[in-house]
């Protein structure tokens, strides 16, 4: 029985002896073709990054130029519109100055001169696109009510009296009409 014991090896001892005999496994290096493929992929990635970076830089520059151009155009447009509006109002100023320089104190001539100036000024505003606010029915978007009047002859929310005319340019109210409202 002792002979049998010698031949039977314990598993732990067998593993130690077998492990000592084996050489450590060598790490396989990537194959040359795989390495070349990876290098090509890296170069393609670098080229794509450079292209996208250039595109981003150009887009940013174009946007900055667009922003500056539109700001400049906006300023030029405002100046142009303001100059056009003032040019339409200058004849009214000329008429007022001529009336003052005439030296005639005749009240009737002065009244007719002022009436002509008022018509000229109204035409200048009309040419600029300014309209008078309608004052038949009260609208809080177009009118400022400063007074309430009880008048049975007028319908509900009717404008009874206009204290100051209102004006609008398109849909924009320049100045609301100041009115008194009935009922």
Image: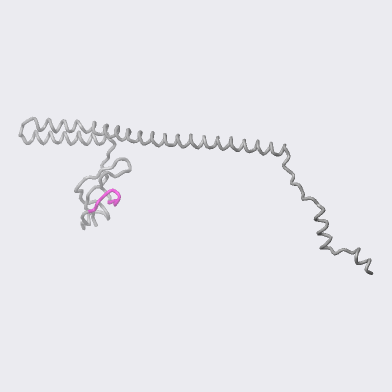
Q: Residue 4 location, x and y as percent? A: 93, 66
- What residue appears at the point 91 percent right and 67 percent down from the top-left corner? 5
Q: Is residue 107 left or right of residue 6?
A: left
Residue at x 58%, y 36% (from the top left corner): 48
Q: Quadrant of the C terminus?
A: bottom left
Dominant secondary structure of the residues highlighted in magenta in the image: loop
In this view, the residue in front, 56 or 109, is: 56
Q: Residue at x 16, y 34 (%)?
A: 117
Q: Quadrant of residue 126?
A: top left
Side of 26 where 161 appears, left or right: left
Please state the horizontal and vertical placement of residue 181, each as a whole percent of the image: 23, 54
On the image, the x and y values in percent for residue 71 come to: 36, 36
Image quarter in which the N terminus is found: bottom right
Indicate whether 79 appears above or below 14. Answer: above
Quadrant hosting residue 51: top right
Could you say where residue 159 lies in the image, as x and y percent from the top left?
24, 51
Question: What residue lies at 12% left-to-right and 33% top-to-bottom?
Answer: 113
Callout count = 0
Tell which of 182 and 133 is nearer to you: 133
Residue 126 vertical placement versus 164 (above, below): above
In the image, residue 139 lies in the stretch drawn in magenta: yes
Front residue of this view, candidates 7 and 181: 7
Instruction: Give the colour scheme shown.
Output: one colour
Residue 131 drawn in magenta: no
Q: Which residues are magenta?
A: 138-145
């Amino acid at each position: 029985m002792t002979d049998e014991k010698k031949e039977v090896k314990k598993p732990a001892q067998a593993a130690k002896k077998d492990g000592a005999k084996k050489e450590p496994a060598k790490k396989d290096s990537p194959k040359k073709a795989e390495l070349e493929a990876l290098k090509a992929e890296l170069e393609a990635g670098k080229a794509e990054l450079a292209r996208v970076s250039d595109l981003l830089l150009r887009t940013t520059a174009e946007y900055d130029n667009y922003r500056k151009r539109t700001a400049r155009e906006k300023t030029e447009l405002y100046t142009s519109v303001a100059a056009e509006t003032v040019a339409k109002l200058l004849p009214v100023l000329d008429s007022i100055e001529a009336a003052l320089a005439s030296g005639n104190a005749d009240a009737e001539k002065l009244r007719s001169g002022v009436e002509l100036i008022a018509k000229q000024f109204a035409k200048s505003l009309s040419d600029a696109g300014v309209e008078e606010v309608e004052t038949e029915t009260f609208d809080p978007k177009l009118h400022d009510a400063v007074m309430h009047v009880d008048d049975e002859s007028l319908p509900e929310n009717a404008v009874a009296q206009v204290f100051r005319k209102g004006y609008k340019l398109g849909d924009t109210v320049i100045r609301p009409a100041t009115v008194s409202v009935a009922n």
